Image (tube, helix red, strand yellow):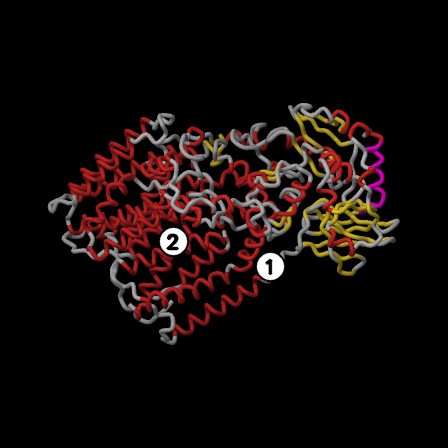
């Protein structure tokens, strides 16, 4: 920040004010309270059933990510936070993974972490409302920095808070934080550009950095185009100013990144060490090879058009009939009034500014027509709209607010632009993009048509020189009614979890809870539990994260950034496809492979019926609770068992799934590069593999006994520390059933040693003959190193404060204007 008086910059929307102050302008700085109050009122109307806890803000329909992913993840974070503090390695994430990178994906969930895991289901609605209200308030302040009137700023804040991206995104949680962050980033830029106050910009970068690194790129692209538009339409686009401004923003951005370094670095590691981040299962080749100017198909384009008028024209939730699904399709709705107002700005601004308005609009509209450019924005990582939808909405909101201000202040309204808008709207709304296969919601359609008429009339009357202030009140009321109706439909016409389900024997509170408590009471060793059913109650998708809420170690996982080594292990055994991107996120675990369950300490499975005949042979039924049967394995191996033989990865990859399972009872699988580190292990002859028709339970027991002979005797086991001893009768390789990760630090007999990657992704420790003490400690690779960068960021920030206090113009950008 600076005490030096800044040079005023040109207004974004130069106007001739022909109006006298009304209620909104007389409210002066207090008008933000009006904006916040209206957002609160509309929110209460739209979310009433959730606020009053008649429903929980968890969805079983296409929004099942809330109940399958969001709820389990945040629940696990809250449990971990209260037990250990800063999250690091968790054995509840698949078969083990570093979870630090996702801890602050949504920093507003710190409220839930501090409140405790029991609060998680009911707190979602309140964290989402806080973000909706905060985003609206920040956007209001942004518009005021652009010299927009109080009335227009209030409307802009409402349109932003209840845009399609915000409301649909709120039922997937993290998107509302992205909207808040982008609004804060733009506000931070304007405060710096106009007043040389740079602290808000640094905070915005910090908040993006601790959440999702990729958003820094996406939001940075939007900010760059915003800056060029901002300078161009106010005749300030000078090379010297642009270069100076960008360089100084980069310096401020660097400070924000340094401040976020502990969390930023861990998030980057999590992404890079996942299949999606490493590119091993990404969509890059497919999407980047598409023709540059290949147009979107009619269904996709038609969906984008319909979703501009309303998020719900093509249905809500599971009833959505457009491209992809209710979340993945375009979410560019930002109020029907924006459809009427946006074209007006071109009739009301100067010719010199008009070209920049056209360019900025085309930048964000053309990717809806030519998907290649949208894919490029996402670096070809997926066929996404998501944050891109918010960028489109922002253009419409900005133009609409600017147009409204010009209409009110200059008392001008283009009937030609209105006529063109209405005709084009009717054409777009009635064109059959779906070949008759999709019917628009009749109620929403009526509301859209009626709104187009009502807004046209109200804006025409408001533009009259003698218009009454009551017309403004009427316009504001109609906007609030529209936003409450549209937003309410987006969240209420869905299959949400009733609050009664939190206490009934259903969902995550089903009879699995009693079964797991029974197991824990009777077995204090380390073991994993698999289930052949899913507890979340989701109607769409499977809940592969039950263990996070029901508190047990499992093998399945639904994660956007799964550990690469865990995925590679599943691929090596043919559990998931080698080229399937979806399966790297939806990993079923070991439930279909009994032999691998034995090798990975799956001692119990919970079933509701014997869907797999082999369970009668391999498991004993030990208890039943309600409809849940507890099966205990007859063939279990302790955690930390040892191999005396090996096969190479190349040999292993050529085997059938049956051979792979049986070989794994006889030998560990090693990369050729690691063989020199393990002298003394003997090679296993693949020819000795027993064929399926000769395999017996006696042989199964023999394999189990052999592997269990020289196993680890645990003295300590937590998520971040494993200790014990092993007596090796000869050189052996110990297999530990969790993915290899460089964060695990090994000591053997008090001396540092290296873990070895086994079986295409799991962890191994090599021993010579004798008794050995082992200790494994997990340490975050970059979190604590990031504090050095954080301190550097604080020093840089302090230096800038000192420079500004002394009146130095080093960071003064307005001197260039």
Whether 597 is drawn above or below 356: the answer is: above
Q: Specify start and end residues of the magenta stretch as a single range.
A: 699-712
Residue 602's label in the rendered image is none
User: Can you see residue 45?
Assistant: no
Give the class, few, some or many, for how many residues have Cα within 10 Å of label 2's Cα (few <14, many ≥20): some
Question: Residue at (84%, 38%) from the top-left corner?
Answer: 705
Whether 86 is drawn above or below 287: the answer is: below
Earlier residue among tags 1 and 2 = 2
Dominant secondary structure, magenta:
helix
Give the class, few, some or many, for how many residues have Cα within 10 Å of label 1's Cα (few <14, many ≥20): some
Camera-nearest label, 1 or 2:
2
- The residue under label 2 is 222
- The residue under label 1 is 782
> Quadrant location of residue 600?
top right
> Which quadrant of the figure contains the C terminus?
bottom left
Q: Where does residue 70 sit, x and y in percent of width and height?
A: 53, 41
**536 left or right of 488 in image:** right
Whether 809 is drawn above or below 357: the answer is: below
Q: Nearer the viewer, residue 594 or 379?
A: 379
Q: Is residue 719 magenta?
A: no
Q: Where does residue 410 sit, x and y in percent of width and height?
A: 16, 51
User: Can you see residue 787?
Assistant: yes
> Which quadrant of the figure contains the N terminus?
bottom left
Q: Where does residue 258 sit, x and y in percent of width and height?
A: 51, 63
Q: Nearer the viewer, residue 186 or 45?
A: 186
């Amino acid at each position: 920040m600076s005490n030096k008086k800044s040079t005023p910059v040109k207004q974004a929307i130069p106007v001739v004010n022909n109006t006298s102050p009304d209620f909104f302008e007389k409210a002066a700085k207090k008008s933000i309270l009006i904006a916040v109050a209206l957002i609160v009122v509309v929110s209460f109307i739209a979310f009433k059933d959730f606020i009053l806890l008649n429903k929980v803000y968890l969805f079983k329909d296409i929004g099942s990510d809330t109940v399958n992913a969001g709820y389990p993840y945040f629940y696990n974070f809250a449990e971990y936070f209260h037990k250990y503090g800063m999250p690091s390695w968790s054995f509840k994430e698949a078969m083990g993974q570093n979870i630090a990178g996702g801890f602050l994906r949504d920093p507003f969930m710190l409220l839930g972490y501090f409140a405790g895991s029991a609060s998680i289901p009911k707190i979602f609605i309140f964290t989402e409302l806080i973000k909706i209200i905060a985003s609206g308030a920040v956007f209001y302040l942004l518009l005021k920095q652009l010299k927009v009137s109080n009335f227009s700023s209030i409307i802009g804040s409402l349109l932003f808070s209840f845009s399609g991206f915000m409301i649909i995104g709120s039922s997937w949680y993290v998107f509302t934080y992205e909207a808040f962050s982008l609004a804060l980033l733009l506000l931070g830029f304007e405060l710096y550009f106009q007043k040389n106050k740079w602290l808000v910009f640094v905070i915005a970068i910090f908040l993006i950095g601790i959440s999702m690194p990729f958003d820094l790129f996406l939001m940075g692209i939007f900010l760059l185009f915003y800056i060029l538009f901002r300078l161009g339409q106010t005749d300030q686009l000078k090379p010297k100013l642009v270069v100076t401004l960008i360089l100084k923003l980069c310096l401020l951005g660097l400070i924000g990144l340094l401040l976020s370094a502990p969390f930023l670095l861990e998030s980057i590691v999590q992404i890079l060490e996942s299949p999606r981040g490493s590119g091993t299962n990404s969509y890059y080749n497919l999407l980047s090879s598409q023709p540059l100017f290949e147009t979107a198909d009619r269904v996709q384009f038609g969906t984008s058009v319909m979703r501009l008028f309303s998020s719900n024209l093509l249905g809500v939730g599971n009833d959505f009939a457009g491209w992809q699904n209710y979340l993945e399709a375009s979410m560019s709705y930002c109020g029907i009034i924006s459809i009427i107002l946006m074209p007006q700005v071109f009739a009301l601004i100067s010719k010199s500014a008009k070209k920049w308005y056209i360019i900025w609009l085309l930048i964000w509209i053309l990717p809806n027509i030519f998907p290649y450019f949208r894919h490029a924005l996402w670096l070809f990582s997926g066929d996404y709209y998501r944050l891109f939808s918010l960028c489109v909405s922002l253009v419409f909101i900005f133009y609409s607010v600017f147009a409204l201000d010009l209409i009110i202040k200059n008392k001008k309204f283009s009937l030609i632009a209105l006529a063109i808008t209405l005709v084009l709207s009717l054409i777009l709304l009635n064109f059959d993009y779906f070949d008759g296969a999709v019917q628009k919601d009749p109620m929403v359609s009526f509301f859209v048509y009626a709104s187009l008429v009502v807004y046209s009339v109200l804006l025409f009357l408001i533009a009259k020189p003698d218009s009454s202030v009551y017309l403004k009140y009427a316009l504001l009321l109609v906007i609030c009614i529209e936003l409450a109706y549209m937003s309410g439909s987006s969240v209420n016409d869905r299959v949400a979890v009733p609050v009664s389900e939190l206490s009934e024997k259903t969902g995550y509170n089903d009879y699995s809870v009693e079964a797991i408590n029974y197991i824990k009471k009777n077995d204090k060793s380390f073991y994993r539990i698999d289930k052949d059913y899913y507890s979340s109650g989701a109607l769409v998708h499977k809940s592969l994260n039950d263990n996070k809420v029901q508190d047990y170690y499992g093998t399945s996982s639904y994660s956007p950034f799964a550990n690469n080594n865990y995925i590679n292990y599943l691929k090596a055994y043919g559990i998931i496809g080698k080229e399937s991107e979806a399966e790297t996120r939806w990993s079923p675990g070991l439930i279909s492979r009994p032999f691998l369950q034995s090798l990975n300490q799956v001692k119990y499975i919970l079933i509701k019926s014997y869907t797999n005949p082999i369970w009668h042979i391999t498991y004993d039924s030990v208890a039943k609770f309600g409809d849940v049967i507890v099966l205990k394995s007859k063939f279990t191996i302790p955690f930390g068992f040892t191999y005396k033989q090996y096969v190479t990865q190349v040999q292993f990859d050529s085997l059938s799934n049956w051979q792979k399972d049986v070989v794994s009872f006889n030998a560990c699988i090693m990369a050729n590069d690691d063989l020199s580190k393990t002298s003394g292990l003997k090679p296993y002859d693949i020819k000795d593999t027993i064929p399926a028709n000769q395999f017996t339970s006696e042989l199964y027991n023999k394999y189990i006994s052999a592997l269990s002979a020289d196993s680890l005797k645990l003295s300590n086991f937590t998520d971040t520390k494993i200790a014990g001893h092993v007596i090796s009768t000869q050189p052996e390789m110990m297999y530990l059933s969790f993915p290899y990760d460089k964060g695990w630090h090994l000591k053997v007999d008090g001396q540092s040693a290296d873990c070895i990657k086994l079986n295409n992704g799991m962890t191994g420790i090599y021993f010579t003959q004798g008794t050995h003490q082992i200790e494994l400690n997990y340490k975050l690779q970059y979190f604590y190193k990031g504090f050095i960068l954080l301190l550097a960021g604080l020093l840089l920030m302090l230096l800038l404060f000192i420079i500004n206090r002394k009146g130095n113009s080093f960071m003064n950008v307005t001197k260039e204007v």
